[in-house]
Image: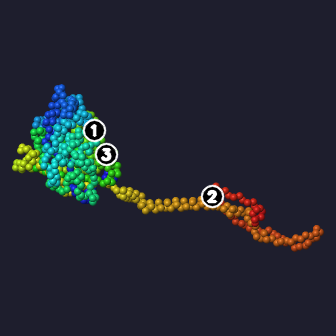
Amino acid sequence: MGHPLVVSTETEEVEIVDIDFPGFTVSGSSGLKRSGIHDSISNYGAIYSGQEIVTGNESIWSIDDAVGVLEIIDQMCSLKTTHAGLNNVTNLENFNTKYMIITEKTYLYDNLTTEAMMERIIPFLQGATYDCSDVIIGCFLNEEPIDCRLLFKKRFSEWGNTCMFNGIPGQLTRKDSSIQTSLTEGEYSPEEAAAWAIANLDQDIGGEKSIGQEQPKINGRIRTPWRQTSPGKTSGLSFIIKENPVNKACVHGEGTGFMFTVNHPSDEPQIKRFGKSMPFGHEVLISVNPLVLLADDDIKEMEKEKRQCYFSDDNGAAELQYYRKYTKKNCFHECIADQVAQKCKCTSFVAPEEMYDRGMRASCEKCRPNCRQTKYTTTTAFSPLTAKHMEEYRKQYSKELSDTDVFSIVYVYFEMDSVQASRRSARYSIFEEVGLVGGTISMITGLTLLDIIEAIVVIMALIWAQHKIRTRMSRMEIDWASYIPRLPWLAPLPQEMIELPVIDIQAVGPQEVIDQETIDVEPLEPQEIPEQPIIIVGTPGNPLPPIHPLENLPGFIV
């Protein structure tokens, strides 16, 4: 009968006001500050030579701490992760790491309970990454000016520092704290975190109350997650991003532009793998088209192995070890982490090469798609800004832009007012299953439902009748005296033999002879009396009464 689920196209289109706007992650020209990489190398050299390095809170660095920081930086900034590094092309201006890691017998674990991590390593990484307000200014949302610090939050990723808009905080999606979550704890206010904690990122779209309805603004002026109410670039997100050529380092692209990626708000961004490069000094248009796949609530009752997709709140096989909610990307992240830990007993921001060689699906067979999911495709266009136009912007934002700063104006928006969604549902409903089974049986045997009903009624009637008969027989009282058997040899004589003439005999003397008429009496011919059957009526266990003696029976002659 095929797969138990079927995907069909919805009759009515889904309005964009009912669709979550994607999480938008952007990174400037570098992942870390060059000054931060310089400091990490200097700390290692000083400690290696015997000097003592003390932090502001009087915490003393060890050689293991210094090497651990260099290992984190090398994972993000290694030249091997770029196309230039694969071709052995070294650009010192990009300041990628190469041959600077000293192979010490030390391991850094992503464990925030240690003093070294909380007192020295985490504060150092916070200083080595830049704030989003340092590179992003002039933010507008649906044509309303909004402080960029309320929109873009720092996100520590496999590329180092990034800025994320409309994405769930890491401390809410992960079960355990990590370096990534610790570096972003101060980015969200308690109100913002509470709004994301109660946000439903896996809801179905349907019903009169949800279609075309603008979601309430839980977090002040900004809905969580944010949704665009009308199509077009002026109704979406717009901002200015500037280049920082002086302090840039850890560059992963070949050009001089910035990188961006889009993802579902419940997923963690992967800008290193899926980022797109855009140039500085241009007006950049990024139009987004959502692909919406819905699912009926009824399929939740199906076995997960049969439907082969998971809801975000599923348990059992869908429960993840490191994440609170299930998504396919989160499952892949966890699968990569397990493979890394199994191979080298350590943590890493990248997956082993053999996982990519086999394919992520083959390497992580337990990771199934989401039953409800929204994917996004992007289309980009850009045109250069004129010198006069950039000069006017520098005057408007004189505090944030210097006379030599190069920047781009970016628009991110839905270009359509509605989309044609698809829906996962059960291939057969209960009514259809019954009809299919009944039709198959009728076709093979010739039976119909009425025949089956009639047979059941007849059987029930017979059972009921038998029950009634048994009930009446058990309640009968039998008078055995009225059922004395009439034996043939005890039958009464005929009436002619009973009514004999009476002879009056008088006493005479012994010598007196009286002459009387002599009457000859001959016996009658015996009558044939039909033999009567013996009928005994009673119940087992009830003995017959004793037969009375014959001489006590009136009307009988022996």
Q: Is residue 482 left or right of residue 64?
A: right
Q: Which residue is mark 1?
A: 338
Are discs 2 and 1 less than 8 Å apart at CB? no
Res 387 seen here: yes
Q: Which residue is most to the left?
A: 388
Q: Is residue 557 left or right of residue 408?
A: right
Q: Secondary structure at mark 3?
A: helix
Number of numbered discs visible in the structure rendering: 3
From the viewer's perspective, is residue 394 above or below residue 10?
above
Question: Within 10 angstroms of label 2, few (less than 14), some, or many (20 or more) residues?
Answer: few
Q: Which residue is mark 3?
A: 318
Front residue of this view, candidates 321 and 112: 112
From the viewer's perspective, is residue 49 above or below residue 35?
above
Between the C-alphas of marks 2 and 3, the distance is 69 Å
Q: Which mark is residue 112?
A: none
Q: Secondary structure at mark 1?
A: helix
Q: Secondary structure at mark 2?
A: loop
Front residue of this view, candidates 472 and 493: 472
Q: Is residue 555 left or right of residue 298?
A: right
Q: Which residue is mark 2?
A: 539
Q: Position of residue 50 (x, y in %)?
A: 18, 26
Are discs 2 and 3 less than 8 Å apart at CB? no
> Image quarter for residue 467?
bottom right
Question: Within 10 angstroms of label 3, few (less than 14), some, or many (20 or more) residues?
Answer: many
Amino acid beneath label 1:
Asp
N-term-proximal mark, 2 vs 1: 1
Amino acid beneath label 3:
Ala
Which of labels 2 and 3 is toward the front?
3
Amino acid beneath label 2:
Thr
Q: Position of residue 18 (x, y in %)?
A: 23, 55
Between the C-alphas of marks 2 and 1, the distance is 81 Å
